[in-house]
Image (cartoon, helix red, strand yellow):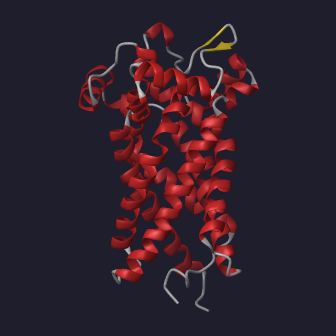
Amino acid sequence: MSNEQKKKVLPFFVNFSIAGLAGMGSAVFVHPLEVLKFRMQLSGEKGTASDHKNSFHAIINMAKNEKLSGFYKGITANFMRQIVFTSTRVGCYTSLIDELKKRGQGTVINNAIASMSTGALAAFISTPTDIAVVRMTADGRLPAESRRNYKGVFDALIKIRKDEGITGLWRGTVATILRAMTANLTQLMSYDEAKVYMMENYNMENGLKLHTVSSMISGIVYSVCSNPMDVLKTRIQQQKIVDGKAEYSGIIEVATTLVKSEGVMALWKGWPFYYLRVAPGTVLLFIFMEQLRKGYEDNFIKDQ
């Protein structure tokens, strides 16, 4: 039996808490890349002039116009999102996979169903915080008179509810759910599979080196597969609402408008920053999770 199969089963609340704390820890380091990713995804929308010539130009523009603080806009919303989204999607997934393994039902199909269902659940309940992240990080690119100027995540949620109704808090839910299902399927499963493969074929021990290599592999798969849905989600959640009417009727109109006016490759807009966020973000997320898990096992679980 491999080390991975011998992994101890932790209570649900522990998996949930570990995932949320790991997500927040990762966000501290990768949030600036999140901001840059959103800026690039919104640049040149509907065929308008691009805000930035390229990724490097985006960094220069932000540093010049918004200083260091601009790279951390929306960090409070991101923390809240990690508490809700990452805790649910990773915590629930981990507990489901542990239970499936315990029952001898840890097949690829069952794991895929578990990853997509937990991703969908997490996306639905966290959509309001996701909208707050998108709007707060993107606000600096707008003219002063068009900015929303949210003071923090709770101010953002209250104003969205007041100005757009309760449905405004779940704007872009379909795109958010589809992205999360893709993310969970590619990120979590590829990480688990990469760990097992490296341990069985390269005799790598369960430690920091294995976690880093597995996370890098997972980040590549995750970023390539989920970037299109991430672009569509960002466009929907950032759209202007004029007299109660949104710019887009839904994900289909966003996708067709984007491809028609900007080309198919626009679905991968912001990919360099997306990958640069996802790769180290994935590494940090899983390293934090593994270390927190080890700490819990060492201090609260007695050897059987």
Residue drawn at x 61%, y 62% as measured from the top left: 112
The image shows residue 23, relative to residue 61, as above or below, that is below
The image shows residue 33, relative to residue 120, as above or below, that is above
Which of these two is toward me, 37 or 154? 37
Residue 178: image location, x then y, percent: 61, 43
Query: Left or right: where does residue 160 sit relative to residue 208?
Result: right
Q: Is residue 205 visible?
A: no
Residue 81: image location, x then y, percent: 58, 43
**In which image quadrant can residue 242 be found?**
top right
Which of these two is toward me, 39 or 264? 264
Name the residue at the right extreme: 166
Which of these two is toward me, 44 or 11? 44
Query: Left or right: where does residue 225 sit relative to residue 201?
Result: right
Q: Could you tell me which quadrant the C terminus lies in?
A: bottom right
Residue drawn at x 24%, y 26% as measured from the top left: 57
Residue 162: image location, x then y, percent: 72, 19
Name the residue at the bottom extreme: 304
Query: Left or right: where does residue 54 sit relative to residue 236?
Result: left
Q: Is residue 236 visible?
A: yes
Residue drawn at x 41%, y 29% as measured from the top left: 266
> Count the marks: how many?
0
Residue drawn at x 41%, y 22% as measured from the top left: 262
Query: Left or right: where does residue 264 sit relative to residue 87?
Result: left
Residue 240: image location, x then y, percent: 57, 15
